[in-house]
């Protein structure tokens, strides 16, 4: 477990927090900035922007702005990290793909949990803004913008995809178990 935490989780957690810090330092606070004065960096015209969005909810802004959302998702994050750790120690991630997925989950959960707990913050900073073709036809109220997300969210989504893939793979021989101290 230590190897995966140091080689996967920690670098991605640092990348997540550094990118969010850069966004907070470079973009005006959307809570106090009129919409027309908000900063947008157009990276790929009509497809990808960098913006600053605050989210107290979860994926796709569910429960965003709710009074107790940070508490609820903070507890869920702590329970998830505890569950992943227990499963890891019990051999619940027997192969490389599931270990990578668990490492990605840990970095993503801790990244967003950190945002919720930082003094003066209390929200997750999202900044990757995509306008996929035809998205405005699928979700008419979106204005064509897929919900903004960040590095931590990406880690969580990739982990979910890896876990789904691993569920459909033929079971092979699991990796030999190492001493609990080493894993």
Image (tube, rainbow, N blue to C red):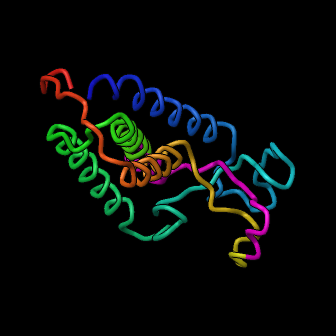
User: Is residue 118 one of those drawn in magenta?
Assistant: yes
Q: Quadrant of residue 32?
A: bottom right
Pinpoint residue 177: horizontal percent, then vertical percent. Answer: 17, 28
Per the rendered image, the range of residues in magenta is: 112-137
Q: Quadrant of the C terminus?
A: top left
- For image coordinates 18% across by 21% down, the residue present is 182
Q: Is residue 131 above or below residue 108?
A: below
Q: Tell me which residue sits at (75%, 59%) in the image.
A: 131
The quarter of the image holding the N terminus is top left
Q: Is residue 54 left or right of residue 129?
A: left
Q: Would residue 120 be visible to someone looking at this image? A: no
User: Where does the image place residue 169, in percent across and percent down from the top left?
Assistant: 38, 49
Residue 87 visible in the current orientation: yes
19 lies left or right of 162:
right
Q: Measured from the top left, where is residue 152 in percent x and y?
A: 49, 44
Foreground of the two, 41 or 130: 130
Q: Is residue 133 left or right of residue 3?
A: right
Residue drawn at (79%, 63%) of the image: 133
The residue drawn where x is 69% and y is 47% is 28
Q: Is residue 123 placed above or below 11 in the rendered structure?
A: below
Which residue occupies the foreground of this view, 59 or 133?
133
Between 174 and 46, the residue placed more toward the observer is 174
Q: Position of residue 82 (x, y in %)?
A: 21, 46
Above or below residue 32? Residue 140 is: below
Pick the residue in front: 176 or 101.
176
Which quarter of the picture shows residue 85? top left
């Amino acid at each position: 477990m230590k190897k995966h935490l140091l080689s996967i989780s920690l670098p991605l957690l640092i990348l997540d927090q550094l990118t969010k810090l850069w966004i907070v330092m470079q973009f005006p606070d959307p809570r106090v900035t009129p919409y027309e004065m908000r900063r947008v960096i157009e990276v790929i015209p009509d497809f990808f922007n960098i913006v600053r969005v605050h989210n107290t909810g979860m994926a796709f802004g569910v429960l965003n702005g709710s009074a107790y959302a940070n508490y609820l998702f903070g507890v869920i994050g702590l329970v998830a990290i505890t569950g992943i750790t227990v499963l890891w120690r019990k051999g619940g991630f027997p192969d490389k793909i599931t270990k990578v997925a668990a490492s990605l989950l840990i970095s993503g959960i801790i990244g967003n949990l950190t945002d919720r707990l930082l003094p003066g913050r209390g929200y997750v900073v999202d900044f990757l803004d995509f306008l996929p073709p035809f998205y405005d036809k699928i979700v008419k109220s979106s204005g064509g913008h897929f919900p903004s997300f960040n590095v931590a969210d990406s880690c969580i989504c990739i982990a979910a995809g890896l876990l789904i893939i691993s569920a459909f793979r033929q079971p092979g021989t699991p990796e030999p178990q190492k001493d609990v101290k080493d894993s």
